[in-house]
Amino acid sequence: MKIIVGSANRSKVAAVREAFASLDMDVEVFGSETESGVPGQPVGDEETLAGARNRALSALRAGENCDLAIGLEGGVKELDGRLFICNWGALALPDGTVMLAGGAQIPVPGEVAEPVRMGRELGPVMEKYTSRSDIRQSGGAVGVFTAGTVSRSEMFRHVVLLLAGQWRFDADREEAAPEQ
Ligand SMILES: O=P(O)(O)OP(=O)(O)OP(=O)(O)OC[C@H]1O[C@@H](n2cnc3c(O)ncnc32)[C@H](O)[C@@H]1O
Ligand SMILES: [Mg+2]
């Protein structure tokens, strides 16, 4: 089975590869840089979710002979007086079906929240905060603020499992009650 991911970000592509491998599925996974149709730094669940869905749909159009496409998007949102990271994923099938799943949300410290609220992207702010240049593609903000306990890739892997699980649920249901 061929799967296309709407991003070339290593932590996202690895998350998809590992999630499907853990389901014992024989898959080929490709990453492809794709338009998210939302700002580089999405704000709020709706914008972040829209980015994930747009990535999945445009990856599906771009990927020849792909069986399904995955879009993963990271954003920020205001909650309880603090700035949280939020994460969304979408799975798109050639028949037009789209599944959605949300990922982890944790607050970021004020010194990271402030520049992001002023309009800067989280990625470069995290690079400055950690003095590391590859943070988006490795542990991510979630990795930094959980002391390495949950990496960005692991967090997205869980989102992909929630997507793949819904797809399996639908497939099982169709098998049990085929359309007339
Ligand atoms: O190549 P793409 O797929 O765009 O990968 P990306 O790392 O930019 O990921 P997103 O577009 O989904 O992330 C949206 C923004 O949030 C930032 N971001 C989100 N989660 C992050 C994390 O865990 N660590 C660092 N930056 C993060 C990222 O730099 C972007 O500015
Ligand atoms: Mg991006």
Image (tube, rainbow, N blue to C red):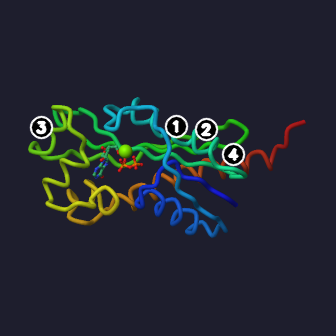
Left or right of residue 157: residue 74: left
Q: SS for tag 1?
A: helix
In this rendering, is residue 30 above or below 58? below
**Viewer-side label of 2, 1:** 1
Q: Secondary structure at mark 3?
A: helix
In primary-sequence order, the first of circles 1 and 3 is: 1
Q: Position of residue 164 (x, y in %)?
A: 59, 53
Give the number of the disc on residue 164. Answer: none
The residue lying at 70 percent from left, 61 percent from top is 1
Residue 2 placement: quadrant:
bottom right
Does 129 sit above or below residue 93?
below
Question: Is disc 4 placed on a helix, strand or loop?
Answer: helix
Q: For label 4, count other residues whose C-alpha is less than 10 Å away and answer few (under 14), some (14-19) or many (20+).
A: few
Q: Residues within 10 Å of mark 1 (few under 14, many from 20)?
A: many
Closer to us: mark 1 or mark 4?
A: 1
Name the element at disc 2: strand
> Where does residue 97 sit, x and y in percent of width and height?
66, 37
Residue at image point 67% right, 43% down: 93
